Image: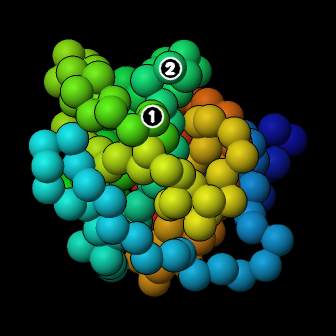
Amino acid sequence: AVLALLVGLLGPASAPASEPAKELELVRPGRAQTSQPFEVATPEGGTLSLAEYRGRVVLLNFWATWCEPCKEEMPAMERLYQKHRAQGLVVLAVSNDSEGSTRRVARFIKESGFSFPVGLDPRMKVANLYRVRVLPSSMVIDRKGALSFIALGPREWDKPAAHQFFESILR
């Protein structure tokens, strides 16, 4: 009876974003920050611009083909993207591979079957704009363009806490 009372007091299982964010070890920026606009080339020769995704929730991920933890987390990012893209989630993966690595990046993305947009940042201009110091690094940008959470290092982007987190901020 006491347990039932406690469960009733704690409320429904759909927790606010802060609890799943804690479980995912996401941190809030020290001060309110607006995301920095950028435009980068894509492996296919096009351009990728953050402005294209204004009004959507963006998981901005910095990675490289030589970074094993980066490559290990990307299938989970694809599953997260597939599950929540209809609700407005965009995964943008920005490669920090060096100049001349376009083919290697394109081959990795194609062989892995990733469908989210990928950009190239060989001179790390965008990575420096976002003060990236470790790969992988991910930033969550809300619908208003605010940088709301940061993840340094790999995450299990398809575990239940990740789905809860994105469901709560996609509402």
The reply, left or right, for residue 94 in relation to residue 149 is left
12 to 135, vertically: above or below: below
42 to 147, vertically: above or below: above
76 to 72, vertically: above or below: below
Pointer 1: what residue? 97
The answer to which of 101 and 5 lies nearer the viewer is 101
The reply, left or right, for residue 74 in relation to residue 138 is left
Q: Residues within 10 Å of mark 2 (few under 14, many from 20)?
A: few
**Could you tell me the amino acid type at mark 2?**
Trp
Q: Residue at x 81, y 38 (%)?
A: 3
The answer to which of 77 and 4 lies nearer the viewer is 77
The reply, left or right, for residue 53 in relation to residue 20 is left
Q: Residue at x 45, y 83 (%)?
A: 144
SS for dot 1: loop
The reply, left or right, for residue 170 in relation to residue 13 is left
- Pick out the residue farthest to the right: 2
Q: Quadrant of the N terminus?
A: top right
Name which quarter of the figure residue 31 lies in. Answer: bottom right
Pointer 2: what residue? 66
Q: Where in the figure is residue 108, as x and y percent of width and height?
A: 28, 21
**Could you tell me the amino acid type at mark 1?**
Asp
Q: Quadrant of the C terminus?
A: bottom left
Name which quarter of the figure residue 53 lies in. Answer: bottom left
Q: Are marks 2 and 1 in contact (CB under 8 Å)?
A: yes
The answer to which of 22 and 45 lies nearer the viewer is 45
Q: CA distance from mark 2 to mark 1?
A: 8 Å
Disc marking residue 83: none
Q: Where in the figure is residue 114, as x and y percent of width and height?
A: 24, 31
